[in-house]
Amino acid sequence: MSDATTSPSELASTTELTREQWLERSRFRNPEMEQIRFGGDPAPAAGLAVEDINPFNAHLFREDRWQEHFARLRREDPVHLNELASAGRYWSITTWDDVRTVEGDWDTFSSGPGVTLSTPVGTALPEGALPFDAFISMDPPRQTEQRKTVRGISAPSSLRNLDDLIRERTVAVLESLPEGETFDWVETVSVELTTLMLATLFGFPLEDRHLLTRWSDVVTTVPEPGTDRGTATRLRDEILDCVAYFDGLWAQRRAEPGFDLVSMLAHGESTREMSAMDHLGNLLLLIVGGNDTTRNSMSGSVYALNRWPEEYERLDADHSLVSSLVPEVIRWQTPLSYMRRTATRDTELGGKRILEGDQVLMWYCSANRDEAMFGDDADALRIGRTNAERHLSFGHGVHYCMGARIAELQLRILWEEILPRFSRIEVQGEPERTLSSCVHGYTSLPVRVSRR
């Protein structure tokens, strides 16, 4: 079973094959390391030889124990090789400089074979898988053409038009919060605000907006060990429900276009001849990108300010610091822990020989905690960090996140409206975190609010 978020084609490939089938199909170098992928309760980093560290374990992230594993790799083996039956050879790239190097060289490190850790290149997908593309899993020039089709949604003029709507909805949600009782910030605030925004960007009926959250969760679900074939089939059927729903929107927008992502794809020069099924990869990319990144930054901001109350005090005393809070929260949280590339040729990085076909994981969460870039206090939230905007949470180069400005806008408006209304948002217990080595987020965060 996969320990990361997957595209639906990869989801099908990992959920419809059992662990034993993968072992039969793959060359296997180190049997003990396979348990790190499939098993829970990974050993503490201090108790492992560096060659046995494998940060690709979703339990490290759900238990919030990933930091020391990456700190050791940055110190001792910043370009780090693992090999598993289910994935073949893959490298963990952990420093800011090296991640940026890989991200910036799409000719050597391609997105084409996929952007999450998957089966070795050339492995056939099983019967019943859903093969499709998204422009995040393409290289220029094809990637450039399809990305250009929807780029206008985040243009400065579009953001100006969205500002009032985001603020109006944020105020409505915050005004509705109960005082003096514990509630789940993730569900009540983060999910609600991001789903409303996502529905607006798609021109999606607001009354059905819960479907967007559901489809995002299906794509990023990590099947637990022992997941049966029936569950895999159900997840696949839900993705097909998504296709059917958007097929109806597709037909509607072809006849009556608006200023939304579906209309842009339905009428774009390089995308208008594609069906909803052909566009499924792009649709799910936009759903997940618009959902997980922003909602986990919103939740992470509340959690982090409670962990460092002195920073909360500074912010409360000077509301103008919100503009500095936003990039620092996005750096500290890093809503997507990694993205994958695949080597197109034999190459060298950090003194290591990377072979053609090797998968290369750019660990943004590690790069954003790199002491060489962000200082010895990189693990802490520090409002006003002078170089916080150099974080790599949105990537770098041709795949820089298209929705970055929208995510920043939503987070900024949220705190601009929180501070005049609430003297404090107090976390009531540790959050429940996402079981994923890719989506770095929260499934619940209990809080109480105190109004001014």
Image (spheres, helix red, strand yellow):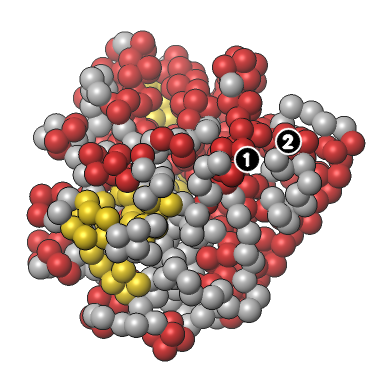
On the image, the x and y values in percent for residue 170 come to 57, 25
On the image, the x and y values in percent for residue 149 come to 66, 34
Query: Disc 1 residue type?
Result: Gln
In the picture of the structure, the residue carrying the numbered disc 1 is 146
221 relative position to 311: left or right? right
Instruction: Answer with mark 1 or mark 2, whichever residue precedes in sequence.
Output: 1
Q: Is residue 202 above or below residue 87?
A: above
In this view of the protein, which residue sits in the foreground, 90 or 11? 90
Residue 424 image-quadrant placement: top left
At 24% from the left and 40% from the top, the residue drawn is 96
In the picture of the structure, the residue carrying the numbered disc 2 is 268
Dot 1 lies on which element? helix
Query: Disc 2 residue type?
Result: Gly
392 relative position to 30: left or right? right
On the image, the x and y values in percent for residue 227 come to 51, 77
Instruction: Name the quarter where the C terminus is drawn.
Output: top left
Pointer 1: residues within 10 angstroms few (<14), some, or many (20+)? Answer: many
Instruction: Name the quarter where the N terminus is drawn.
Output: bottom left
- Whether residues under marks 1 and 2 lie with C-beta atoms below 8 angstroms apart, the answer is yes
At 26% from the left and 60% from the top, the residue drawn is 354
Dot 2 lies on which element? loop
Pointer 2: residues within 10 angstroms few (<14), some, or many (20+)? Answer: some
On the image, the x and y values in percent for residue 293 come to 47, 40
At 10% from the left and 61% from the top, the residue drawn is 46
Residue 132 image-quadrant placement: bottom right
In this view of the protein, which residue sits in the foreground, 29 or 446? 29
251 relative position to 403: left or right? right
Q: In this view, does 150 lie above or below 120?
A: above
At 35% from the left and 63% from the top, the residue drawn is 356
Distance CA(mark 1)–CA(mark 2): 8 Å
